[in-house]
């Protein structure tokens, strides 16, 4: 058996592998898949709620010929009922892949370290790489290419922003990130991203400046899961960072609007924006299925 590969960060794929998987997903979406997961099993371990990620993984595994076992956080008690290392070692004897949504990215790193099967990040506090793969697929489908395009991310420098930042320059895209004071992306991620490819990373304060050169305008919630107690404070500090039709009008003609969802209408996104003529938010959500199928085929087929 070949050395196992994990996908807990977008940087687990080389720049060329990232581009290859976007093309693979686009191609397979048109032509259909064989059954690369025939007879294979996937554990879905979710410490947090999910609609898109949970359903798209469950359906995707089945469509690839495999089967999945879903476990909620309390059931497993990752690091509470038993150490993460034991969970990893035991699950490795039952399943061919572990897909995990966790609070702490360090738990995911431990799962990957102690598991003998591939571990896929279904969201952690640090990254959301599967979301980024679906985002790239959506941009590719609607723009016909990725290279040279600019994505403006408006809002919190969170896990979603970090995965976009780390992936986009690697495929030749530029990343503009506009955040309020105290919510900027960390400089280390920006520095790593800049070293991964030809695309640029620009961090700035003004949403208007960020979107002025944008082919894609993207936003995410101001308070992520686990930050609910900060929601009111964040609503005040993110004032002026709502993506609405006026901000979209400042982007390049034909720019796409994207949101990874769930959306908090009236906060990071105006009511009606997901139905805006330039919005691709629903195809973006649907592409979670296709992008993750390509990731699973890449990591698991042939083992
Ligand atoms: N975008 C996303 O990860 O959605 P869920 O939280 O519903 O999985």
Image (cartoon, rainbow, N blue to C red):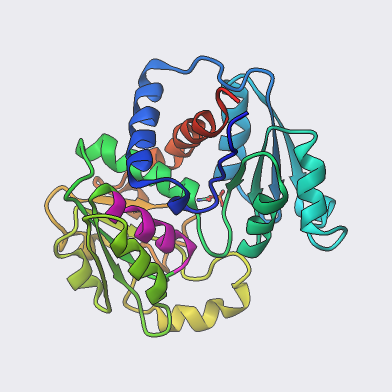
Query: Does residue 95 appear left or right of residue 259 in this picture?
Result: right
Secondary structure mostly seen in magenta is helix
Residue 253, percent across and down? Answer: 11, 51
Residue 185 against residue 72 in the figure, above or below:
below
In the rendering, at what x and y percent does residue 47 appear?
Answer: 71, 55
The answer to whether residue 281 shows anywhere in this view is no
Residue 105 within the segment the image draws in magenta: no
Which residue occupies the foreground of this view, 159 or 116? 116
Decide: is 50 above or below 162: above
Residue 41 in percent (x, y) is at: 70, 29
Residue that appears at 15% across and 63% down: 250
Residue beneath the point at 57% across and 30% down? 300
Quadrant in the picture for the C terminus: top right
**Residue 166 versus residue 288: which sits nearer the camera?**
166
Q: Position of residue 238 (x, y in %)?
A: 40, 78
Residue located farthest toward the left when viewing the structure as drawn:
253
- Count up the numbered dots: 0
Span colored in magenta = 158-170
The image quadrant of residue 190 is bottom left
Residue 286, image quadrant: top left
In the rendered image, which quarter contains the N terminus? top right
Q: Is residue 162 at least partly visible in the picture?
A: yes
Residue at position x 30%, y 47% in the image: 279
The residue drawn where x is 38% and y is 38% is 283
Whether residue 179 sits left or right of residue 41 in the image: it is left
């Amino acid at each position: 058996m070949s050395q196992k590969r994990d996908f807990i960060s977008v940087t687990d794929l080389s720049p060329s592998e990232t581009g290859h998987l976007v093309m693979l997903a686009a191609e397979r979406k048109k032509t259909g898949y064989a059954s690369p997961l025939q007879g294979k099993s996937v554990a879905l371990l979710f410490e947090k709620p999910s609609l898109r990620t949970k359903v798209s993984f469950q359906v995707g595994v089945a469509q690839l010929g495999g089967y999945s076992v879903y476990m909620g956080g309390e059931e497993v008690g990752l690091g509470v009922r038993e150490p993460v290392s034991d969970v990893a070692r035991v699950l490795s004897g039952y399943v061919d892949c572990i897909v995990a949504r966790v609070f702490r990215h360090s738990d995911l790193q431990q799962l990957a370290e102690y598991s003998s099967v591939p571990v896929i990040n279904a969201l952690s506090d640090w990254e959301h790489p599967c979301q980024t793969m679906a985002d790239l697929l959506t941009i590719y489908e609607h723009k016909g290419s990725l290279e040279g395009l600019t994505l403006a991310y408006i809002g919190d420098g969170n896990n979603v922003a970090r995965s976009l930042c780390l992936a986009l320059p690697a495929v030749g895209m530029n990343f503009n990130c506009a955040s309020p004071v105290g919510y900027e992306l960390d400089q280390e991620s920006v520095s790593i991203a800049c070293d991964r490819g030809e695309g640029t990373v620009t961090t700035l304060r003004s949403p208007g400046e960020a979107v002025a050169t944008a082919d894609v305008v993207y936003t995410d919630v101001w308070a992520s899961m686990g930050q609910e107690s900060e929601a009111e404070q964040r609503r005040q500090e993110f004032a002026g960072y709502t993506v609405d039709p006026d901000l979209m009008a400042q982007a390049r003609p034909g720019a796409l609007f994207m949101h990874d969802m769930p959306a908090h209408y009236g906060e990071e996104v105006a009511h009606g924006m997901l139905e805006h003529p330039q919005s691709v938010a629903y195809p973006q959500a649907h592409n979670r299925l296709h992008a993750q199928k390509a990731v699973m085929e890449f990591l698991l087929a042939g083992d």
